[in-house]
Image (spheres, helix red, strand yellow):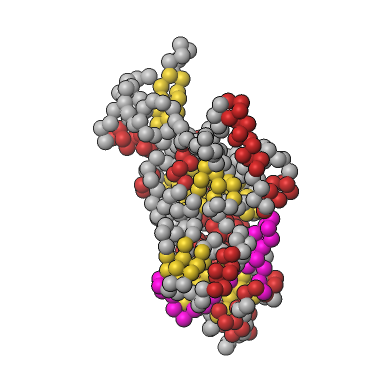
Amino acid sequence: MTATAALTGGFANAPVDAAHAFRAIMTVMARPGEIRSVTQATPPAPLSVAAGTLILTLCDPETGLHLAGACDTPAVREWVAFHTGAPIVAPADAVFAVGSWADLSPVSQFPIGTPEYPDRSASLIVECNALTASGAVLEGPGIRDTAHLSLPETAAFAANHALYPLGLDFFFTAGDQVAALPRSTAVREG
Amino acid sequence: MSLMDDYNFAYLDEQTKRMIRRAILKGLAVPGYQVPFASREMPMPYGWGTGGVQVSAATLTPDDTLKVIDQGADDTTNAVSIRKFFERTAGVATTEETTEASIIQTRHRIPEVDLTEDQVLVYQVPIPEPLRFLEPRETETRKMHSLEEYGLMHVKLYEDISRHGNISTAFAYPVMVNDRYVMDPSPIPKFDNPKMEMAAIQLFGAGREQRIYAVPPWTKVVSLDFEDYPFEASKADHSCELCGSDSSYLDEVILDDAGNRMFVCSDTDYCRSRREAGHQGRLAGETV
């Protein structure tokens, strides 16, 4: 890696790119199971375009970011530091975390909020190989009847939903695709 | 240099927008829960929709078409100034037609036309806490929400019935969201409450009180009531005297000192499009 690699791959036009990315992110969070494309960032490997765009859109010096397992490389740390200034933290202090499902597990290490402030919980960005509207059955707010999403497993997400209104919120990323699963969604095997 | 070059897109700086965006996402993840946020000073007074403006600013993209309504009307001071504010600071297209808009910022109404999946409805909220007039302490209301302790609200509705013979709350009628949080739907008439289970994303911003909350599409929203006093979405028992609609929410307009009055649609776009389609009410065409 060259000394300047960390300086590239950010938003070309920050306010406009972030606005477009956020609308896609907000839409997938409001409609669990829906898959959208976000292409605004070019992060260093192994981060996907979608995970990089999520980090640039939502992270800043006020949000601790946990880099799990294979994502914790010097190149990723430098890129995150230059573009967002987000501190890299341990799971227990994370507002955001990014990594593969295996690297993020067990997810019980992340904060789930408090009864009076359930918003003080972590949002996890789960890197996947592919996202499809198939597999686990989703029900809850944002879904008219049922939706389907290729989750890495169902038991952990059903357990997370059982904590409602506490719990973690998940983004799933693959390439430039993003989907979301808030804690309000009930999950069962498809 | 155009006006737009003088401002960051949509007025707010990027760090502020990120903070608001994170609050919106948590609000969507826990429907009806009021997420605290660091509300900014806006170039308009509190009470003029500073919360809604901040939520709209964090949600807008340059491709959006914005509609702003105040009590259903596109042409009142509050609506006109907010529309102009975003025309100048975000350069977005604006419209008065509900069906043309992708983001609708509203003060105290839900449009008569059903909203679609591609639309976002942003409410301006004065007092986000439904329990505030029953319990003034924030520490206590926060605890009541965390324990799902909403008995006080039912006592309030019961006292309405024992005093007035019915639930007299006509606007800001409390709702239960996703079977968990009691939420203030902002001061919309209770006529609008049943529309809240809709296809569009609903975001609520309270600037002075520094709270953001949200209702995702098709979320269960139930107006609180009793088995023997069921909720009723009431409106004035008239039809619009300009367009003849008997299903829209009506404003009562006093015409003179002799007590004459007329009822007209509160949703000006709905009323105008009906009149353009040839519908006529009792006073259509008259100069009043």
Residue at 73%, 47% in the rendered image: B140
Q: Which residue shows up at 54% across the image and 73% down it? A: A155
Residue at screen point 51% across, 63% down:
A185
- Asked whether, in this view, residue B280 is left or right of residue B71, the answer is left
Identify the residue at image location x=55%, y=41%: B224
In the image, the segment drawn in magenta is A109-134
Above or below for A137 versus B47: below
On whether residue A117 falls in the magenta region, the answer is yes
Residue A120 found in image quarter? bottom right
| The stretch drawn in magenta includes residue B246 | no
Please name whichever residue, B115 or B232, is drawn nearer the observer in this view of the structure: B232
Q: Residue furthest front?
A: B228
Q: Position of residue B107 (x, y in %)?
A: 51, 40
Q: Which of B261/A107 is in front?
A: A107
Residue that extends furthest to the top in the rendered view of this protein: B258
**Viewer can see residue B232:** yes
Residue A182 percent coordinates (x, y): 54, 64
- Res. B93 visible in picture: no
Q: Main secondary structure of the magenta part?
A: loop
Single out the residue that lies furthest toward the left: B278
Q: Is residue B46 left or right of residue B120?
A: right
Q: Position of residue B93 (x, y in %)?
A: 41, 50
Q: Is B115 left or right of B133, judged from the image as shown?
A: left
